[in-house]
Amino acid sequence: MTRKYAEVMVGWLKDMGYTHCFSVAGGNAMHLLDAVRSQMTCVPFVHEVAAGIAAEYFNEAGDEGKAFVVVTAGPGLTNIVTALGGAYLESRELLVLGGQVKAEDLADPGMRQRGIQEIDGLAIAAPVCVTAKQIDAPIHRAHFEELVSSGWRGRPGPVFLEVCLDAQGAPVEPADLEGDGGVPVTPARDLLDPVDAAEAAGQIEQELAGAERPVVLLGGGVSRDAARQWLPALRERGIPIMTSWNAMDRTGVDDPMYFGRPNTWGQRSANILIAQADVVVALGSRLGLQQTGFNWQEFAPSGRVVQVEIDPLELEKGHPHVDVALRADANAVLQALAAGPAVDAAAWVDYCRTAREAIPLDDPGNENAPGFLPPFTFVQQLGDMCTGDDVVIPCSSGGAFTVMMQAFPQKTGQVVVTDKALASMGYGLSGAIGAALANPGRRNLLVEGDGGFSQNLQELATVAVNDLPLKVFLFANDGYASIRMTQRNYFGGAYLGCDSSTGLGHPEWEGLFRAFGIPVLSIGEDWQESAEFVELWNSPGPAAFIVPIDPEQTYFPKISSRVRADGGMESNPLHLMSPDLPDDVAAKVFTYLREADASGGEQA
């Protein structure tokens, strides 16, 4: 039977495992929208950027089905670029089908516009996509599937397919489009070409054989499935395990071999310990500047660094110093390492436990004003309230984000998804919607600051109309906590655009949530014991909790930087966070760095 090409395309996507379409309606995507209506679970969004972020988190947080996005031409595409950029930097799948004007209405080269709402979508999207392609006439199935699957082959990332309006509505015979139509199908850029996983593991074993203080750092390239399957055996080898932020949920805090999340805004004890390791095996982490610190020259100063990465450009970028660079699938290497022999590192493991116990997650240097909740203590208490079945979204930037990443005690079985690379405000609510749509039978919780929340608060409509099982914890501190702290630390408190007194407005939060029909509660001390809180926390639908945070709240520990005379910035290494540790604690946790210093090695 003759069918519209858009219907055939959506049928192919269904065969490829896609189940959900997130969209904002528009005329230049009308045939695509009509096609998904009868074949997919369709979720309309208020704004395209929210739809894109939600699709990314749906795919990252869910185990069944996949989501893609349909947007219209012009503003539909420009609005979703932030989501494309975020997924690109995080190496996550995101498929966007964009409408475009009819092929005959496309502007000539150099012309700004001919068709209604026309803009050069490919030129805008291509830099933040692994594939960007305009479809101005029906293409065959094999070619279409190649384009779509390029988003998850090699190093994953977004795919943007811009489909002209007349191509969407073109009548086609589906049988005629099976196969490649005689057009050679070229495989997508394959970043793997890896050494065999067993060979890579063999090289790592050589490093571990002589190690006294080894650490395995799990990155987001290690999947949850691989972690669930192979970490128990790796744990039995007696090697301390740490995680990047993107791999936070690969193990729980109750894991006896888990020793934290090192990072520029990481846990101080983890930063100190990784600096004293004599072998650091980074599996599936690109070791970017946030992971190693801006002073990357002093990352792991006491040891050798082994990096297993899928992208050769990350292995060759020159920072940090990597002694053994292995281009391989981190999941396969983890499997091979799990079968290795026990490592004699019992004394090192005991030392790691001592350091973790000696350094609190809520730094004593933080000042908590009366009438407000201390954020580091709050997120630890919130973590204790959670179960291993919860899905946790710790927003993506600002004070609420760093507090969650430093102090939240994740539990085995939880799904935790965030975005740290683009670190855009406004990700939290949109991402939590996608996670909740992917996990309708689980409790989903979002921790977000009021500044970031304001940037996508219109999507409360999407939460309400879909009755999502989402619990929102809103850090109410009158604006941008991290910007306020930066302006205080570097510019003597010359504030601008960071709170209501400097021109940044916010709604009355309880009234806002009520306007969308979402139950809301402002919480105070002993909030966990409140009957009203417990009822909303355990209810099946959405609820919001306003968490009062001091606008002048400090967020220690942190990496301190100073402005040089030439205007540049210079940062401390990861293991030297501010404020300084008390002398007795420092003496206990800097043992190997002090020994190196005493022997003329690296400075502590």
Image (spheres, rainbow, N blue to C red):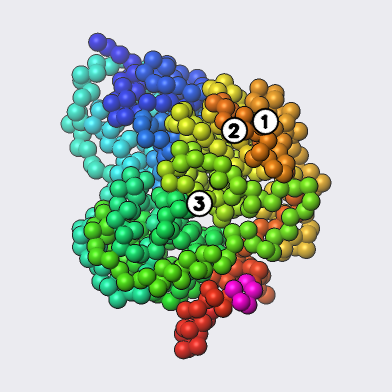
Residue at the image position 60 percent from the left and 47 percent from the top: 381
What distance separates the C-alpha of mark 1 from that of mark 3? 37 Å
The quadrant of the rendering that contains the C terminus is bottom right
Q: Secondary structure at mark 2?
A: helix
Look at the picture and state if 454 lies above or below 349.
above
Residue wearing tag 2: 537
**349 and 461: which is toward the camera:** 349
Q: Residue type at mark 2?
A: Trp
Q: Which residue is mark 1?
A: 532
Magenta region's main secondary structure? helix
Vertically, is 169 above or below 351? above
Number of numbered callouts drawn: 3
> Which of the 4 image quarters holds residue 149?
top left
Please tell me which of labels 1 and 3 falls first in the chain: 3
**Mark 1, secondary structure of its residue:** helix
Local crowd size for mark 3, using a 10 Å CA cut-off: few (<14), some (14–19), many (≥20): some
| Residue that numbered label 3 is attached to | 421
Is 105 part of what is drawn in magenta? no
Instruction: Say which amino acid is labelled 3.
Output: Ala
